[in-house]
Image (spheres, rainbow, N blue to C red):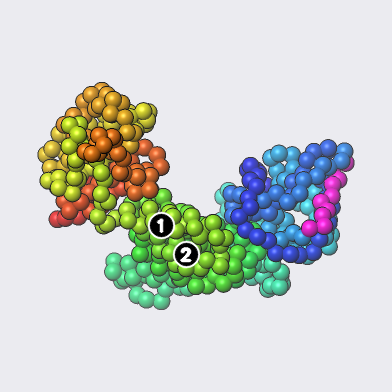
Amino acid sequence: MKVVGSLVFILLFGTCSFAQYDIKGKIAGLSKSEVYLAHYFGYNQQVIKDTVLANESGEFQFKGNESLPKGLYLISFLKSKYIDVVMEDANFSFSLDTTDILKSITFVNSSENTAFYAFQRKMNDLYTAINQPNLALTQKQSVSKEIQVFQKQWKTENATLFVSKLIESSFDPEIPVYTGTLKSKADTTKMQMYQYQYYKKHYFDGLDLADERMVRTPFLQRKLERFFKDLVVQDPDSIARESDLILAKAKDTDIRRYIIYKIASTYENNPILGTEGAFVHLAEKYYIGEPALWDSSTVRRMKERLAIIKPLLLGKPFPKMNLTDVSGKELNIATLPFKYTVVFIYDPDCSHCKEETPKLFALNDYFKSKNIGVVASSIVRDKQAWKKFIAEFKIGSWVNGIDIHINPQTGKEEYYTDFKNTFDVYSTPVVYVLDQQKKIVGKRIPVENLKEFIQYLENKRK
């Protein structure tokens, strides 16, 4: 059995109404300990629905008048152990012994869980057999065949049960045998492409995207994360296209919201350069475009976030940053003559900025050789702290700017730059890289990766 992670309270999605619940349990080896009932929300979060105290004999009862949403639940006990249970029937009982949970667990009035654990026991026995050391190849092949026969028979016998969907969703698609010739390297490449394309096209076949119960299982999140990590090219167009294809099949409201949320949150601040474009696509099409899925505050926040991110996508002109230099003269980044411009936005009191500035300064000679300039802008409008920072880190050779402007009529200081909402500065330092036309070609590049990134840009131009 697995070890329980921390149980997280989540209030993201509404739940559907089902029968009241009454679940009795008896766990040998448990005495006067708390027992938790929770449902999965993805594989790494669980929503606690009830907590009870077992008596000295390990007996306990979850009982409530409110309804429980269907799905895959866990019953957690002894801080380090839990069992998975299918919540299709909300009135059942079970018993187990902690010394051997899988072998001892039995259910009454739950065909779902009886079938679920019968499957697990048989598969455990078969995998134990096939993994015996020194097992002959013919014996391995025989056990492997037995596994296939058992799984097929089990799915047929339990086709009407939700647990059958759960098991099916955990499997990978089976790729049909390639029937083409294999006489050359080109033939092998063609076979590999066929296998990849078939696998990708049928990856979600075993997962019912119309069944809202799948939200309350670990399998939907696992499938989504693996699909986008291993099978999708990490550029915004590919991510957007694959997202659209998946969501075209996801008709259930809870499933649809979950998929949109998971993909969008993955790419909003993804470390892979340029993938924010996929977030913009999802936000515009599925948050703004389908407001009925969300509450009004979520749609409003998404519109606000889009207003910040969209003008900062790769290829967009760098927004005007109103700055003055150390002499008080207005700076215009658009007129700087550099082939590339590194914009370094910092806070003079930020400890991380103080660590990154010397690393950036160490690239000075390389930057000069490539006609790369650095514009360093303080977000703090304090001339004394700003000039002290410039002197301390000896960055006077950079183009140093601050958002302090003297009104010629009043003589008072005025501030024009909204660093947070115009340049998405929610922490410092932030690095942008601009091309000769002052279009954004890089953002949030770690300072230690800047040289390698510039070389990548140079190679692209060849």
Image coordinates of residue 301 in percent, x first then y, are: 48, 55
Image: 353 above or below 19: above
With respect to residue 121, does 447 lie above or below? above
Which quadrant: the C terminus? bottom left
Instruction: Using the rendered view, name the quadrant where residue 372 is placed.
Output: top left
Q: Residue at x 31, y 30 (%)?
A: 382
Q: Helix, strand or loop at disc 2?
A: helix
Which quadrant of the structure image shows residue 148? bottom right
Write down the region rendered in magenta: 57-66
**Foreground residue among 75 and 417:** 417
x, y percentage for residue 290?
Answer: 51, 68
Residue 121: x %, y % from top left: 71, 56
**247 vs 280, nearest the viewer:** 280
Disc number for residue 306: 1
Q: Is residue 293 above or below residue 266?
A: below
- Report which quarter residue 277 is drawn in: bottom left
Magenta residue check for 64: yes
Q: In this orientation, does residue 118 appear?
A: no
Residue drawn at (36%, 51%), measured in percent from left and top? 272
Q: What residue type is disc 2 on?
A: Ile
Q: Are marks 1 and 2 in contact (CB under 8 Å)?
A: yes
Q: Does 8 lie within the magenta span?
A: no
| Residue at image location 63% in from the left, 66% down from the top | 212
Distance from label 1 to label 2 (Cα)? 10 Å
Image mark for residue 370: none
Tell me the element at label 1. helix
- The answer to whether residue 292 shows anywhere in this view is yes
For this rendering, which residue is in front, 129 or 315? Answer: 315
Amino acid beneath label 1: Leu
Task: Please tell me whether the stretch drawn in magenta is mainly helix, strand or loop.
Answer: strand
Q: Which mark is residue 288?
A: 2
